């Protein structure tokens, strides 16, 4: 009988199984799409960021409802809607993700993609600190060093650059707390995002009705209608990756997104990176290197400890 456990099969053969490779493909696909988002939102530069946000919420809710219907998963959502605690947490998550989306769209429309990239480089390290503050998690020595270096990166930009990189800090904080809220909810990402966007739909429709309609080209309307797909596809790929890959592997893949954003800002959008900003990025990359090194060494030591004598 063949072994159906991909992780076990990998251990026995020493080679990644088809499912492992598929998980890696899904993970890289999700983070690559998130990384090239600036190209899509730059194409909508004629539209106000808040208008784009409202369209993204409405179209995402519609598409996610279709996906859940096709997958016949409404039965898993109704219990969530009957729980006041879950609704309260999902409402908080809705506010946080909406703020995150709005700030990200604003960063692109105002040609500050480098700051957005910095924010998502900082985010994993902020999440470590939030876990310590709110979940009672203990930081290892090298994790402390990584967090301190990341704080130094922000401080360098604030003092040498002459201003606090508020876009980077805001993106890291909103997404970090969003992850913290999600950790309190036992709901998968697809269902949670459907509920979150649905909670925001009424306000979004009211805002669209009150805002000046604008005279958008057919191409702009087409791009706005694609915002649901732009939101849902990487989420579905990410969900498939989560089921197939170790969280530590996903942790390494999460740097694909901001790395692509950094490259796009420099090469396609021609953003200038002065010495203070470059120093902040270097500090951030050092912090990430320390974090990754600590994770790899910890996994290696655990593997040695788990080996039979």
Image (tube, rainbow, N blue to C red):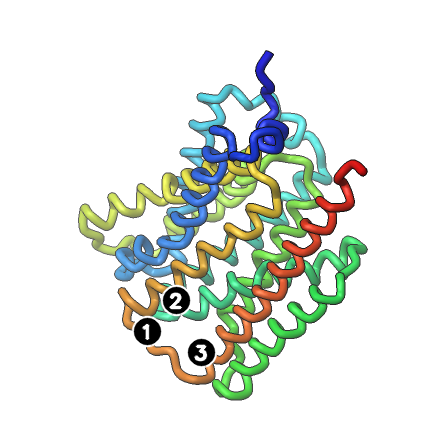
First-in-chain label (1 vs 2):
2
Q: Quadrant of the N terminus?
A: top right
How packed is label 2: few (under 14 Cα within 10 Å), some, or many (20 or more)?
A: many
Is the Cβ of the residue at disc 1 closer than 8 Å to that at disc 2?
A: yes
Give above or below for 260 relative to 285.
Answer: above
Give above or below for 228 relative to 154.
Answer: above
Q: Residue at x 56, y 71 (%)?
A: 286
Query: Which label lies toward us, 3 or 1?
Result: 3
Label 3 sits on residue: 278
Estimate the spatial distance between the alpha carbons at disc 1 and disc 2, rounded to whole Å. 8 Å
Label 2 sits on residue: 113
**Is label 2 in a helix, a strand or a loop?**
helix
Answer yes or no: is residue 88 visible.
yes
Task: Give the image quarter of residue 122.
Answer: bottom right
Give above or below for 275 relative to 46.
Answer: below
Horizontal relation, residue 71 to residue 296: left or right: left
**Is label 3 in a helix, a strand or a loop?**
helix
First-in-chain label (2 vs 3):
2
Horizontal relation, residue 139 to residue 162: left or right: right
Q: What number is the disc on residue 271?
A: 1
Query: Which label lies toward us, 2 or 3?
Result: 3
**Is label 1 in a helix, a strand or a loop?**
loop
Q: What number is the disc on residue 186?
A: none
Q: Position of residue 257 (x, y in %)?
A: 44, 55
Answer yes or no: is residue 195 visible.
no
Give above or below for 230 relative to 161.
Answer: above
Q: Position of residue 79 (x, y in %)?
A: 67, 27
Estimate the spatial distance between the alpha carbons at disc 3 and disc 1, rounded to whole Å. 12 Å
């Amino acid at each position: 009988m063949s072994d159906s456990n991909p992780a076990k099969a990998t251990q026995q053969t020493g080679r990644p199984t088809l499912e492992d490779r598929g998980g890696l493909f899904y993970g890289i696909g999700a983070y690559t799409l998130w990384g090239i988002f600036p190209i899509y939102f730059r194409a909508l530069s004629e539209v106000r960021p808040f208008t784009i946000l409202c369209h993204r919420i409405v179209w995402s809710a519609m598409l996610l409802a279709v996906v859940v219907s096709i997958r016949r998963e409404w039965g898993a959502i109704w219990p969530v809607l009957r729980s006041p605690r879950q609704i309260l947490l999902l409402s908080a998550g809705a506010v946080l993700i909406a703020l995150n989306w709005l700030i990200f769209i604003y960063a692109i429309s105002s040609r500050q993609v480098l700051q957005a990239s910095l924010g998502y480089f900082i985010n994993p390290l902020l999440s470590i600190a939030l876990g310590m503050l709110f979940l009672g998690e203990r930081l290892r020595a090298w994790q402390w060093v990584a967090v301190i270096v990341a704080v130094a990166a922000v401080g360098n930009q604030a003092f040498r650059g002459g201003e606090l990189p508020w876009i980077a800090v805001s993106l890291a904080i909103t997404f970090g707390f969003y992850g913290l809220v999600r950790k309190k909810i036992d709901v998968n990402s697809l269902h949670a995002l459907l509920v979150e966007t649905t909670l925001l739909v009424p306000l979004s429709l009211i805002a669209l009705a009150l805002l000046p309609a604008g005279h958008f080209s057919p191409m702009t309307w087409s791009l706005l209608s694609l915002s649901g797909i732009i939101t849902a596809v990487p989420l579905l790929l990410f969900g498939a990756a989560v089921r197939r890959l170790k969280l530590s592997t996903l942790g390494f893949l999460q740097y694909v997104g901001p790395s692509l954003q950094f490259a796009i800002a420099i090469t396609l959008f021609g953003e200038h990176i002065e010495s203070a900003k470059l120093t902040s990025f270097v500090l951030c990359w050092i912090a990430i290197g320390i974090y990754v090194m600590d994770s790899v060494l910890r996994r290696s030591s655990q593997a040695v400890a788990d080996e039979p004598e």
